[in-house]
Image (cartoon, rainbow, N blue to C red):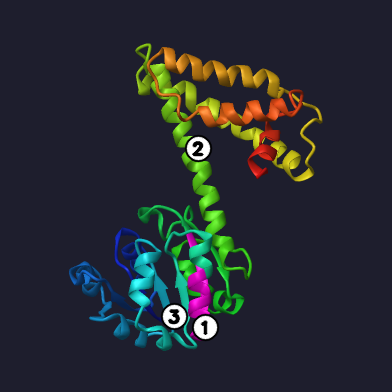
Amino acid sequence: MSKTISILGLGAMGTALDNALIDAGNVMTVWNRTQTRADALVARGARRAKTVSEAIAASDLIILCLTDYAAVDATLADVGPMLANKTVVNLTNGRPDEVRAIAARLEGYGARYLDGGIMATPPMIGSPHAFILYSGSADAFEGAKEQLAAFGQSHYLGEDPIFAAVNDLALLSAMYGLFGGYLHATALAGSVGVTAKQFLPLVEPWLAAMMTALPDYAERIDSGDHARDVMSNLAMQSVAITNIVTASRSQGIDPAFMEPMERLAQKRLAGGFGTDEISGIIEVMRAK
């Protein structure tokens, strides 16, 4: 079913979201601080709003995709009362504390608030590979899920509005950890003249093989039992981690990416858990 929707924010991601909604047959109103960014969308049939107030008045479903939460605050500063009885879907990347603050503020105006985390790049929007995390008002999600499906897979995580932001940042953490590990590994291999293209056939299948350990690690983490059927204990792995750090220095590679892992492994070892699986390092991460 088509719907009248307003999008505030037309960067690369906001534009991709709008195009997906137009493709799905929705009636779109668009606003951006730099008005010319709306030109291509207007050419596709979207209506240009000259002000935030005009954009909000046009629709009952408002989607925000802005640079950060400071931009969200500034954009909505003078229009709070206009949001009463409207559904606001905020797809701006932010921290849990920022989400709680904006959710409380908008709910105070009588809006139905839904926070979202986009797990995709702009070109992926509308494809089966894109998925969006949502949390907040269950009524808001139910009422908008048909339209939100235009972006990709939708995953509703619950009524606490911070769930999407926390899981978004957690998934990005895993991604940046993977990228950082790859970059450090490639730099280390490159210190002896191996090019990135030469190294790729070694590192790509290695990482894919190591990913198969994750279900076992997940079971250990949830049970708290890191000592059962250990294949490669922490004491042995910590030697390899320290060797990576030391070798990196000697090869002229900054070991900054690996040093936190070395510190955490040593802390876990000092607690007497050298015979456990490396998954036990999460217990040190959780400690405050």
Q: Which residue is more in the foreground, 105 or 219?
A: 105
Residue 108 circle label: 1
User: Helix, strand, or loop for circle 2?
Assistant: helix
Indicate yes or no whether the magenta region holds residue 89.
Answer: no
Q: Quadrant of residue 34?
A: bottom left
CA neighbours of label 2 inside 10 A, class few (<14), some (14 to 19), many (20+): few
**Mark 2 highlights which residue?**
177
Res 102 visible: yes
Which circle's residue, 3 or 1, is located before the other in the chain? 3
Q: Position of residue 209 (x, y in %)?
A: 59, 29
Residue stretch in magenta: 101-117
**Label 1 is placed on what type of residue?**
Gly
In front of the other: 237 or 101 = 101
| Marking on residue 61 | 3
Mark 3: amino acid: Leu
Instruction: Label 3, secondary structure: give it.
Output: strand
Disc 2, disc 3: CB below 8 Å? no
Q: Secondary structure at mark 1?
A: helix
Q: Residue 228 falls in which quadrant of the image?
A: top right
The residue shown at (55%, 61%) is 164
